[in-house]
Amino acid sequence: MAVSGARAAVPWACDPQQSRGRLVGEDDMPPRSAFRRDCDRIIHSTAFRRLKHKTQVFIFNEGDHYRTRLTHTLEVAQVARSIARALGLDEDLAEALALAHDLGHPPFAHAGERALNACMAGFGGFDHNAQSLRVVTRIERRYAQFDGLNLTWETLEGIAKHNGPLTDRAGAGLGRYGAGLPHAITVHSAQQDLELWTHASAEAQVAAIADDIAYDVHDLDDGLRACLFALDDIAGLPLVGEALDEVNRLYPGLELPRVVNEVMRRMITRFIEDVVRESDRQAAAAGVASAQAVRELGRPLVAFSPAMKEAEKAVKGFLYPRMYRHERVNRVMADAQRVVRELFGHFLAHPTDMPTWWHEDLASLDEARLARRVTDYIAGMTDRYALEQHARFFDLTPELR
């Protein structure tokens, strides 16, 4: 099955002409659609540029060829566009959501997120998905008429709930949000109803599954590059082994770097082909005829087939102990968490050490709002800047190697 050709828009795609609009009204700007403008605003944002120096798995000083948050985001966007095009969905909306999905990530990947969540335990915690919404609705300060990027309703709902509903119909939190919604979601919901009880659009679901595809494949690639495991170690994984056998059959004697690349590109293609087939099948079976019908279906529409879901689960099952929990990675991330915790404690005690506009209204901030302000400041830092700031205020800053 080819995945490169576009097809006519399906009835369950989001239509930019029917967008629910922006919180602050703006005139249309042809020939760009509303969703294309969202893409462009995200690309030009400060938070997007900072992704270049934020960790995916490996710290920036471990090598120039490992993925960063930025290169990961670009790979997610490429996969999302391919799936959206093949399904007849709105490519611009899928791309916008892929580009925005990690804007709220703090420095040092999930280690930084865990540290900030612990620091904010008494003030509602920290959630990088919710922080992405906060970045695009409040923290970015670029435009004369509004804070944030004033993105469309469809993009904001996709950022908030691309992984599924956050509440039930009565507003009670689901799953990990059973104890309460993240602060950023609660604040924004007071201004704009994102229908947190429904699933997000098909385009948002595409961005979410593209994220899984991208990091499954590129983390295998980066793990091989870092010598955390060898090609023989992953040859027994479903999908990987099939791709490797095909490459060895077609190109006997090919040097290892080319073999790895050929395997990874085949994996991406097969993931995408499977998602397109399965999503088409589910859409036909459910008889969805509108974007809102997708939201109210009660389950995801964009999905892997059962067999591919098991194959993808096996890849994750390999990566967790062999990469994400590897002793080398854990050691670096433990030091990174200490950097974040100590920065939080310092700026909470000495808020005037933050840049002026972060503390200019200090007298009006209670403890909770000050803690959130410090968290916003730290979450926006790159790895490099966080280490530089730590070295300003502490005698011993880890090298993170």
Image (spheres, rainbow, N blue to C red):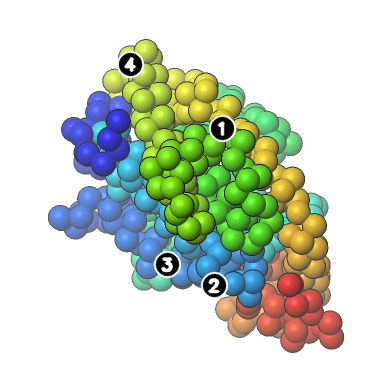
Which is closer to the viewer, label 4 or label 1?
1
243 relative to 56, above or below: above
**Residue at image mark 4:** 284
Location of residue 144 by image quarter: bottom left
For image coordinates 30% across by 48% down, the residue present is 92
SS class of the residue under badge 2? Answer: loop
Which is closer to the viewer, label 2 or label 1?
1
For image coordinates 73% across by 60% down, the residue present is 329
Q: Earlier in the sequence, mark 3 or mark 4?
A: 3
Whether residue 235 is visible, yes or no, is yes
Location of residue 104 by image quarter: bottom right
Q: CA distance from mark 2 to mark 1?
A: 30 Å
**Residue at image mark 3:** 45
Looking at the picture, tell me which residue is in the foreground, 82 or 43. 82
Mark 1 Cα within 10 Å, few/some/many (few <14, many 20+)? some
Instruction: Find the residue positioned furthest to the front.
Output: 253
Query: Three-letter amino acid code at disc 2?
Result: Asp
Q: CA distance from mark 2 to mark 3?
A: 23 Å
Q: CA distance from mark 3 to mark 1?
A: 39 Å
Pinpoint residue 309: horizontal percent, then vertical percent.
54, 28
Query: Three-letter amino acid code at disc 4?
Result: Ala
Q: Tag on residue 238?
A: 1
Look at the numbered discs 3 and 4 and tell me whether their residues touch, using CB distance below 8 Å: no
Pinpoint residue 22: horizontal percent, then vertical percent.
35, 50
For image coordinates 68% across by 82% down, the residue present is 388
Q: CA distance from mark 3 to mark 4?
A: 38 Å
**Residue at image mark 2:** 64
Figure quadrant of the N terminus: top left
For image coordinates 74% across by 86% down, the residue present is 392
